[in-house]
Every structure is written in structure tokens, then in C-alpha cells.
Image: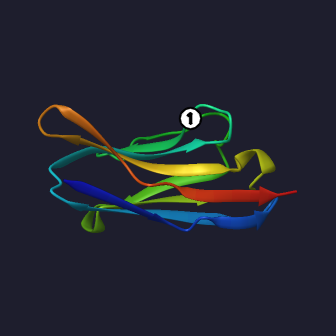
């Protein structure tokens, strides 16, 4: 069993910054990738950022240049630094971990709310 605990969400004004953290614990085998997704009310969950075990990162155009994902392998923790936040970034942000067991298995955190006021 793998647990993902997110922290760092909150309310911030447009143009501000927040840093999300996600710590993984439990029976973790090989981590293939970790990442962040978000879901706004009435919308589908969408990719925000991912980082592989080789530190390859991926961002959609909507956050590229504003958000940075990083990880601390020793702590099994992934971070999301969010700068220049916009009201459209408002959503519940979910941490994701892809593990090889040996088939690929997805794990999700409980989500943390990010609200950007205009």
C-alpha cells in the first residue's frame, strides 16, 4: 500500500506564488514518475507537471514557464513551485505516483485546494 500526502494549498492573489509538496510512504517499489494533476469544477482532470525517475520533466503550455516540478528521491517527495498564479489555476491539485510492481500502477493523493483570487 502506498500513501501520498499533499500539503501547501491555499488562497493566493493573482500574481502570487505557492509551493505544493507530496510525500509518498508505504510499500514503494520502483518509482517510474511522479506528478501533479488538477481538476477545476465542471472540468476534467488535467496534467500540470510530471517528472520521471530520470528527472525528465513535462509541462503543458498553460503552466510552462510559471510552474516548476522537482523531487527529493531520498524523501520520496515531489514539489510543485507555482509562480505568477492566475485565477484560471484555481483547482484541486492531485499528486500522482507511477510505480513499477513490475506492471505500472497509479497512486493518487487526496487533493489540495488552490484558489487564486483576482
Name the residue at 45% across, 43% down: 50
Mark 1 sits on what residue?
46
Q: Determine the residue located farthest toward the right in the rendered image.
A: 118
Q: Is the C terminus in the top left, top right, bottom left or bottom right quadrant?
A: bottom right
**Quadrant of the rendered structure where residue 51 is?**
top left
Q: How is the image coloured?
A: rainbow
Looking at the rendered structure, the number of numbered marks drawn on it comes to 1
- Dot 1: within a 10 Å radius of its alpha carbon, few (fewer than 14), some, or many (20 or more) residues? some
Residue toward you, 71 or 39: 39
Which quadrant holds residue 85?
bottom right
Residue 88 visible from this viewpoint: yes
The structure residue drawn at horizontal position 14% and vertical position 50%, both measured from the top left corner, is 29
Q: Residue furthest front?
A: 42
Q: Position of residue 100 (x, y in %)?
A: 18, 39
Q: Position of residue 82 (x, y in %)?
A: 63, 57
Q: Determine the residue located farthest toward the left in the rendered image.
A: 102
Q: Secondary structure at mark 1?
A: strand
Tell me if I can see residue 83 in this picture: no
- Residue at coordinates 55% horizontally, 35% vertically from top-left? 45
Say if 61 sits above or below 10 in the image: above
- Image-based side of 47 in relation to 32, left or right: right
Amino acid at each position: 500500500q502506498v500513501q501520498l500526502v499533499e500539503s501547501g494549498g491555499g488562497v493566493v492573489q493573482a500574481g502570487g506564488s505557492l509551493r505544493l509538496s507530496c510525500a509518498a510512504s508505504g510499500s514503494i517499489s520502483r518509482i517510474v514518475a511522479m506528478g501533479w494533476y488538477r481538476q477545476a469544477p465542471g472540468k476534467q482532470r488535467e496534467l500540470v507537471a510530471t517528472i520521471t525517475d530520470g528527472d525528465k520533466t513535462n509541462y503543458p503550455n498553460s503552466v510552462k514557464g510559471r510552474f516548476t516540478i522537482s523531487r527529493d528521491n531520498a524523501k520520496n517527495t515531489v514539489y510543485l513551485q507555482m509562480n505568477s498564479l492566475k485565477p484560471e489555476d484555481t483547482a484541486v491539485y492531485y499528486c500522482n505516483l507511477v510505480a513499477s510492481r513490475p506492471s505500472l500502477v497509479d497512486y493518487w493523493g487526496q487533493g489540495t485546494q488552490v484558489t487564486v483570487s483576482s
